[in-house]
Image (tube, rainbow, N blue to C red):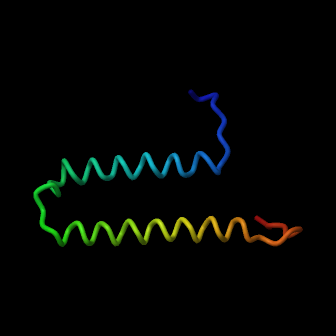
Amino acid sequence: MSSLRLGPAVSIPLILGISCVMGFLVSWRLMHLSSGGKMIFIVLGLAAIFFFFMILLIYAAHFSVPEGLKFVS
């Protein structure tokens, strides 16, 4: 499995998806959010929407770099 080479366009969403599923499972089972009220789901939904739009902004910034621009590290 360590010899599998994926590009950043595949590996980053894959890693983020796995971490979201793991976070959901931990919060649902270990933090007992399954017995929570409606407000918990509203807050978690807003956080998920915010996270999704932040990821979209990162991708938009990545693909809107002008041709010929060099990054200096």
Q: Quadrant of residue 32?
A: bottom left
Q: Quadrant of residue 3?
A: top right
- For image coordinates 44% across by 67% down, the residue present is 51
Q: Residue furthest right?
A: 68
**For the C terminus, which image quadrant?**
bottom right
> Residue 25, percent across and down?
27, 47
- Of residues 46 and 32, the one nearer the viewer is 46
**For the N terminus, which image quadrant?**
top right
59 vs 30, left or right, is right
The relative height of residue 41 versus residue 35 in the rendered view (above or below) is below
- For image coordinates 43% across by 45% down, the residue present is 18
> Residue 4, percent across and down?
63, 31
- Of residues 73 and 7, the one nearer the viewer is 7
59 vs 71, left or right, is left
Total number of numbered discs in the rendering: 0
- Of residues 37 and 69, the one nearer the viewer is 37
- For image coordinates 34% across by 72% down, the residue present is 46
> Residue 34, percent across and down?
15, 55
> Residue 67, percent across and down?
86, 68
- For image coordinates 79% across by 67% down, the residue present is 71
